[in-house]
Amino acid sequence: MFFSFTQNITDYNPAAFDWVLKTSYEVMLPVAFYLSLFFFMMEVINVVVPKSQAGESLVFKDISFAFMRWLISLALSTIGVVLFVFIVSISTGAINLFNKSGTLTDALLNSFIPQIKLPDNPLSALGQLFGLLTNPGDLISTAVTGVLMYVICLIAQLVAALSVAVIIYLRFFQLYLMAFLSPIPMVSFASREFDSIGKNYLKHGFAYAFQTVVIMAVMWLFSFFAKPTIDLSGTLGIVTGLSAWGAAMGSVVYAIAYVVLIWQTLSVSKRLFGVGV
């Protein structure tokens, strides 16, 4: 599943990409051409009308700028699918940089390996250990709590893994759909009045592409926040300075927040590129 983080739309589902590339050129591109004529006329009107009302003469430069915008919009429309391949390749490059410092498998393992704080005086630790062994109630409570924390962490990781699998499927589906329809919004760059359509479309494309980067950040941060910490520097068996059961409840809170944040990664990614949720 995590392997798909480094896949582009060209290799996640090659058959779907071939269909998108072929059908987009055969269906969407001709439609986009006729729409571009509309946007071109709107741009010319926005140039001609104000000058006519002001009594100014129309020069060739005014029309040539509108013509250049129209040509650029046609070029962007033609390479619309390729643009989305390029956008996703940027996000996969970011994932590869992430993997140099540690993969998601490392993050999962990091959340299960406890951090142990040893006491400054080993002799006092031995005395506390002896006291704990002579008090079976505290020993059982500490052991049960430790197991409970690991179980909660395991359940959270399993739910998160299932959530990520669904999110990745939806992400790629959206990217294929947006790449297929991309020629139409790209021709809006022919008009300064309507070019926000194309800009917002590209922003949404970047948001979906970089959702995997946000997911990796969330999963790594969870591995640090929910990492079990056994503090042996003070009273033996106290976890993270709280009571044992209080620490277990803290793990429940982290687990719930973790799953919620996994489903909020698209919203975070959209805010990253200034797109309204």
Image (tube, rainbow, N blue to C red):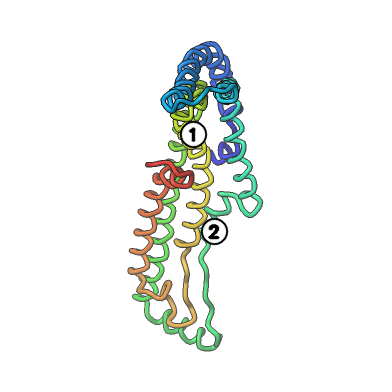
Q: Is residue 235 visible?
A: yes
Which secondary structure, mark 2? Answer: helix
Residue 58 picture location, percent across and down? 53, 22
Sequence-first tag of 1 and 2: 2
Residue 261 picture location, percent across and down? 40, 50
Q: Nearer the viewer, residue 51 or 161?
A: 51
Q: Is residue 177 visible?
A: no
Q: Is residue 201 above or below residue 68?
A: below
Q: Is residue 129 above or below residue 108?
A: below
Residue 51 picture location, percent across and down? 47, 26
Q: How many marks?
A: 2
For the residues bearing labels 1 and 2, Cβ distance under 8 angstroms: no
Residue at image mark 2: 110
Dot label at residue 199? 1
Amino acid, disc 1 = Lys
Dot label at residue 258? none
Q: Residues within 10 Å of mark 2 (few under 14, many from 20)?
A: some
Q: Nearer the viewer, residue 80 or 132?
A: 80
Is residue 107 left or right of 267 when viewed as pictured? right
Amino acid, disc 2 = Asn
Q: Residues within 10 Å of mark 1 (few under 14, many from 20)?
A: some
Find the distance from the CA under tag 1 to the CA under tag 2: 40 Å
Single out the residue that lies furthest toward the front.
Answer: 55
User: What residue is rendered at 40% in x and 61% in y?
Assistant: 149
Is residue 216 left or right of 237 when viewed as pictured? right
Q: Quadrant of residue 248 in the image?
A: bottom left
Residue 83 picture location, percent across and down? 59, 29
User: What residue is rendered at 42% in x and 80% in y?
Assistant: 132
* Quarter of the image that includes the C terminus: top left
- Indicate which label's residue lies in the foreground, 1 or 2: 1
Q: Nearer the viewer, residue 237 or 17?
A: 17
Which secondary structure, mark 1? Answer: helix
